Image: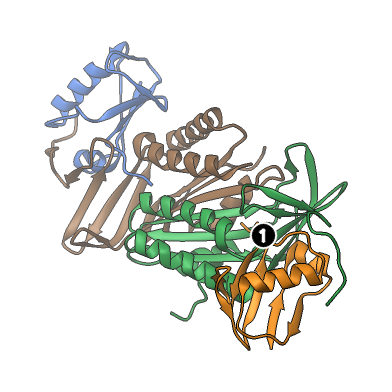
Chain colours: A blue, B orange, C brown, D green
Amino acid sequence: MITVLFFAQLQEVIGKERIEFEASNITVGELKEKLMRSFQLSQLENVMTAINEEYALAEDVVSDGDIVAFIPPVSGG
Amino acid sequence: MITVLFFAQLQEVIGKERIEFEASNITVGELKEKLMRSFQLSQLENVMTAINEEYALAEDVVSDGDIVAFIPPVSGG
Amino acid sequence: MSKKMYEIVENPIQVERVVEKVTRREAGAITTFIGTVREWTNQKRTIYLEYQAYKPMAVKMLTQIGEEIKMKWENTEVAITHRIGRLDIAEIAVVIAVSSPHRKAAYEANEYAIERIKQIVPIWKKEHWESGETWIGDQLGKVSYPSGQPLSVGKEE
Amino acid sequence: MSKKMYEIVENPIQVERVVEKVTRREAGAITTFIGTVREWTNQKRTIYLEYQAYKPMAVKMLTQIGEEIKMKWENTEVAITHRIGRLDIAEIAVVIAVSSPHRKAAYEANEYAIERIKQIVPIWKKEHWESGETWIGDQLGKVSYPSGQPLSVGKEE
């Protein structure tokens, strides 16, 4: 099971804070593709990704039990 | 009557916070000379002077009723 | 130390509390940056702001920024508290406190902290204007995303 | 405004009180500098400090520094409180708060304020070391005057 978290505008567009689904050995890039298709999102390109609270690259692999978060451009401070 | 104020090490050396004396149309430079003689102070050169709470130059004239302050190198902050 | 140096909170921030965390006998200088909610941005009037955070990761990133600072500026101590939720005009969103034996490092390290917060800490600000609302994205050159764009609403999986 | 923006006080300074004086709806950034009493200077240990001020002139000079800042950095607001008397280690000697719509100006103006205080404000610090006491003179390149020198004690006129 992979948990995916959404924040800010992504959370509003998708209408949920989190989703969970079965997958393993999928890369961050592949996961983005899958979500863009599933939610008909026109782009997730400039959205960064974190795996288990650490920033990740498109080629990093997501494993069972991981928490993946999509991080739209931040605006704290 | 001119009032002269002393601070910090100057105040301790002279042993007073203020002195008053009669004088008029004396320059800051002349006043310094006079005080160095009176109090046997070896130097007042790098001590700045204020007349009525404004920094003054050696050639500025002190008038009756003025408050003159000797300002040793400051160290606030 | 047992004090929480890096915090995400939901209630008003007391500046004094954050300053106390970095106060030390060996420090002579403490700088703080206090980010407050500004009413006007260009010609647009903000009514209130809403901050959201990915809390555990935000705390981790604030901690990382503190570690970066301690590597770059010798003998500094850092505390950062960021508030989330609804904030009204002039309320405090973030307080950064840096202590150091000397003032130059305290200023430089403090400014570094706010720059890094705007780059890597997963916190988002939603501006509520008189005329609508917008999530603000600072990270990639002040990109802003009016609701619903550039993402189009889709159905769930 | 009726708030005292520039003050010399004899009791502990509350950082929050100084910050409040510059908090405004149009400011998004407030920086503070907090000068505290440091225990160690090089190898010497300070037991406590004593600050003395030429009070009315010190307030005048702090006010002048504030005016200089407002000329140099648009739409800034400044408040400075300096404490005098006896101060123990880690106590606050000075708080400078600057607010501005944008953070860059708030940092720069704040640093300018502390530099100017060390140049023109008639306040003096006496260090009480383990081994004695010294009035410190920062103004002309860190000159210090061990008591009784370079001035020699004389009789009154």
Q: Kindly identify the residue that appears in the image at 79 percent across and 63 percent down.
A: B41
Q: Which of A60 and D126 is in front in this view?
A: D126
Which residue corresponds to mark 1? B45
Q: Is residue C62 left or right of residue A2?
A: right
Image coords of residue D134 (percent x, y): 79, 53
Q: Say what amino acid the circle numbered 1 marks.
A: Glu
Count of numbered marks? 1
Q: Can residue D98 be seen in this view?
A: yes
Chain at numbered mark 1: B
Q: Is residue A5 above or below residue D103?
A: above
Q: Kindly identify the residue that appears in the image at 43 percent across and 33 percent down.
A: C57
Q: Is residue A51 left or right of residue C21?
A: left
- In what quadrant of the picture does the C terminus of chain D appear? bottom right
Image coords of residue D42 (percent x, y): 73, 37
Q: Nearer the viewer, residue B10 or C103?
A: B10
Q: Is residue C2 above or below residue D10?
A: above
SS under mark 1: loop
Residue D54, quarter of picture: bottom right
